[in-house]
């Protein structure tokens, strides 16, 4: 039975030495809270750092590991140097600020990066020690973005998921990172990559496309011989835990104490880690402005500000603490009176029962981070409102805003808007409060933390099943051996080959994809073998094919089947075609080329092509979609069709295609060996007309009419070389 291995920077427990003995105490944090409902269990193991530097554990590693094993954990031991440079350094001085758009706080330090690489390798060693072949490995967050690929290299068939709990920035920001390729390739070692919102999915996919040049299709990214799924999984909470906690005796006791402290004042609640991304100073400035503009609420409203200590070893956080302290003192001094303190400031973590008491009592929850991956506090607040009253004021830059649309959504940088939102929240009728909260509660109940976990693991199982299906069609060594044997036994062989992406790699400019010194000799030797008929079926114009391949004794097909040339013959058309439509279509293609820097129009005898390989991927994607729509409308009454290839949109006569050209050669003889290889959708017509006994191969791991798949043009060349050599050995 498969187990779930949860891998994160920190374990859900921390080792603390007290009275000379090592003790394990529960850790704090969003991930620990989120996964608390599915961990621990007999079929799960949590792998992570135990919170204590290796230097303090020398000689006790086995003892500590045994203690952790009892709690379904496996420890990763890190030195103080690695903690300083990997955790406080690269993770929290490079990735954290960059991914939250705090570019001025971002430090690019080579030593930080080297420590990050080293620690990810240490984690990999520990995962491999624990993992069984059928385990599900779920890696979490920005501390371990290299780990999926490292584990993949050691466990090629493992089911690996990765979830990022913070935002993923736009590609323009991400490309500032010097190690951007390593990070993307590391994450893509997973089978399933999850984010909180679709915005983050889109940013990641754009970064992969712009930086690695890998396209995504309906959430799938083809990398090597695998398809990686990328999707949004908004993290939920344990809804029942929060919705029923108000009945706990401890919660009721806390409610009495808090109410005694604040009297009958309305309560505005702010709870967050003390982090510069949370916008706590800005929140205090908003409260100051609210008091100034709404004097009627003085001595009637109290802001309870809970700031949970975070990363106190980082200078930016120490500066933030001083600023918050000063703002609280200034507001209390400015507006406070005997018997009323405008801001009740708690700089500490609060126990669960007190947290629920604060949620229960709050009239308004002010959750206005400057940037946040999800923000579970907003969800916890809504779930805790048993009577349905209370208003959530939520930043539009928190991932939770995508789900909690009934909250008052604000721009965290617009102080006047937030001031107005606080007033609206305090004045909102109870009936409206209840209506808004009930809708959000129903949504949170449906997609709780259990739903989040189940959804992610279920999707991971589906992508593994999809990979297994594609693996069946991958050209294995056994299939190649069978193909070579059939080739050797046959006498009349037809070899149909696409050109771009099949025999040669794609180039930024079509004219630069000339045949190289490896492919020409390979084709020359193939055509000299008795019984071989080699035909190159391309979308290129006949002049280019003649220039590049005309001196070879091969059959040629140009413009996807408009022109054909048999060995020793002249070019001829399959049927007479008209060019009258070109004058109507050409200006449209030229207009889109002008609007898309890097795009170009190529005119062939009986087709027009719009190339966009050299254009900016984001802009090209938009323009290509717009162009397809315009062309569809323009060509509805013409006898031409729209053909999509790799980074090209082509308009040509609908009566010709590669399938019809392939039929021309298939009908010439009773072939006892047929092989056809192509790389894009233009080749599907060729695959469709092949006899059942033929070997059809699609370059790239995509669903196709072809029977088999290979990874790249290099595999095609290697296969053709095997066929060539088979004759010499026969």
Image (spheres, grey):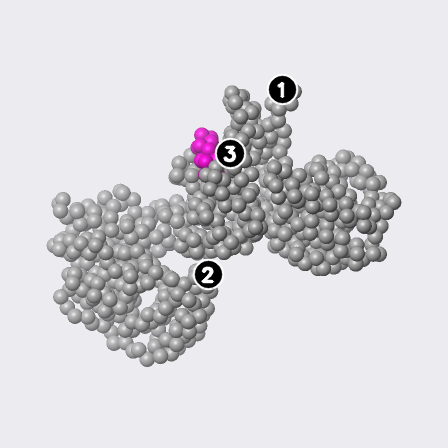
Residue 124 on the magenta span: yes
Label located before the other in sequence (1 or 3) = 1
Q: Nearer the viewer, mark 2 or mark 1?
A: 1
Q: Residue at x 62, y 26 (%)?
A: 16
Q: CA distance from mark 1 to mark 3?
A: 25 Å
The front one of 656 and 598 is 598
**In screen coordinates, is 273 left or right of 533?**
right
Q: Residue at x 20, y 62 (%)?
A: 549
The front one of 509 and 404 is 509
Whether pointer 2 and pointer 1 mark residues with C-beta atoms closer than 8 Å, the reply is no
Label located before the other in sequence (2 or 1) = 1
Mark 1, residue position: 20
Other residues around mark 3 within 10 Å, as few (<14) / some (14–19) / many (≥20) = many
**In screen coordinates, is 33 left or right of 287?**
left
Q: Which residues are magenta?
A: 116-130
Mark 2, residue position: 618
Q: Relative to residue 391, is residue 307 depicted above or below?
A: above
**In screen coordinates, is 128 left or right of 405?**
left
Determine which quarter of the picture holds residue 182: top left
Other residues around mark 2 within 10 Å, as few (<14) / some (14–19) / many (≥20) = few
């Amino acid at each position: 039975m498969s187990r779930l291995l949860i891998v994160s920077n920190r374990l859900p427990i921390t080792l603390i030495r007290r009275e000379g003995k090592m003790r394990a105490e529960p850790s704090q944090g969003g991930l620990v809270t989120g996964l608390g409902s599915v961990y621990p269990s007999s079929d799960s193991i949590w792998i992570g750092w135990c919170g204590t530097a290796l230097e303090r554990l020398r000689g006790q590693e086995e003892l500590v590991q045994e203690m952790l094993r009892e709690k379904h954990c496996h420890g990763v031991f890190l030195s103080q140097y690695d903690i300083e440079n990997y955790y406080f350094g690269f993770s929290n001085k490079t990735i954290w600020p960059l991914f939250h758009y705090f570019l001025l706080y971002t430090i690019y330090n080579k030593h930080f990066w080297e420590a990050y690489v080293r620690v990810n390798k240490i984690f990999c060693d520990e995962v491999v020690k624990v993992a069984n072949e059928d385990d599900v490995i779920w890696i979490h967050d920005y501390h371990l973005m290299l780990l999926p690929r490292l584990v993949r290299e050691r466990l090629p068939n493992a089911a690996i998921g990765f979830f990022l709990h913070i935002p993923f920035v736009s590609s323009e920001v991400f490309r500032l990172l010097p190690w951007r390729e390593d990070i993307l390739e590391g994450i893509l070692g997973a089978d399933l990559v999850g984010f909180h919102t679709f915005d983050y999915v889109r940013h990641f996919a754009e970064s992969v496309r712009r930086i690695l040049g890998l396209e995504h299709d309906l959430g799938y990214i083809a990398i090597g011989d695998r398809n990686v799924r990328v999707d949004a999984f908004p993290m939920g909470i344990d809804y029942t835990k929060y919705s029923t906690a108000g009945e706990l005796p401890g919660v009721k006791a806390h409610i009495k104490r808090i109410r005694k402290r604040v009297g009958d004042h309305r309560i505005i609640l702010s709870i967050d880690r003390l982090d510069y991304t949370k916008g706590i100073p800005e929140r205090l400035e908003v409260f100051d402005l609210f008091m100034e503009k709404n004097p009627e609420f003085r001595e009637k409203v109290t802001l309870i500000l809970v700031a949970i200590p975070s990363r106190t070893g980082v200078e930016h956080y120490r500066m933030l603490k001083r600023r918050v302290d000063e703002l609280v003192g200034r507001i209390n001094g400015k507006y406070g009176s005997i018997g009323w303190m405008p801001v009740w400031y708690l700089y500490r973590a609060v126990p669960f029962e007190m947290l629920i008491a604060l949620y229960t009592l709050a009239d308004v929850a002010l959750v206005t981070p400057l940037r946040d991956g999800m923000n579970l506090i907003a969800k916890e607040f809504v779930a805790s409102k048993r009577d349905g009253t209370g208003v959530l004021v939520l930043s539009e830059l928190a991932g939770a805003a995508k789900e909690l649309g009934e909250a008052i959504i604000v721009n965290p940088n617009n102080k006047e808007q937030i001031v107005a939102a606080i007033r609206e929240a305090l004045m909102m009728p109870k009936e409206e409060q209840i209506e808004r909260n009930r809708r959000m509660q129903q949504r949170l109940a449906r997609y709780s933390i259990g739903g989040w976990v189940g959804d992610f693991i279920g999707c991971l199982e589906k992508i593994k099943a999809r990979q297994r299906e594609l693996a069946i069609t991958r050209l294995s060594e056994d299939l190649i051996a069978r193909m070579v044997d059939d080739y050797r036994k046959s006498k009349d062989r037809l070899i149909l080959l696409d050109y771009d992406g099949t025999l040669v790699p794609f180039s930024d400019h079509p004219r630069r994809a000339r045949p190289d010194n490896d492919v020409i000799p390979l084709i020359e030797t193939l055509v000299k073998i008795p019984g071989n008929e080699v035909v190159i079926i391309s979308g290129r114009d006949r002049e280019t094919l003649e220039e590049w391949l005309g001196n070879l004794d091969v059959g040629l097909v140009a413009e996807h089947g408009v022109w054909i040339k048999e060995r020793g013959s002249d070019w001829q058309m399959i049927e007479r075609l008209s060019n009258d439509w070109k004058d109507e279509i050409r200006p449209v293609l030229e207009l889109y080329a002008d609007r898309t820097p890097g795009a170009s129009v190529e005119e062939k005898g009986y087709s027009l092509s719009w190339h966009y390989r050299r254009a900016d991927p984001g802009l090209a994607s938009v323009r290509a979609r717009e162009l397809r729509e315009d062309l569809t409308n323009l060509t509805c009454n013409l006898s031409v069709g729209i053909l999509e290839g790799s980074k090209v949109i082509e308009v040509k006569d609908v009566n010709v295609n590669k399938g019809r050209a392939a039929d021309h050669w298939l009908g010439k003889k009773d072939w006892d060996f047929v092989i056809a290889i192509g790389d894009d959708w233009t080749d599907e017509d060729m695959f469709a007309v092949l006899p059942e006994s033929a070997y059809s191969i699609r370059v790239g791991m995509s669903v196709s009419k072809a029977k088999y798949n290979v990874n790249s043009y290099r595999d095609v060349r290697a296969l053709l070389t095997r066929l060539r050599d088979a004759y010499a050995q026969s």
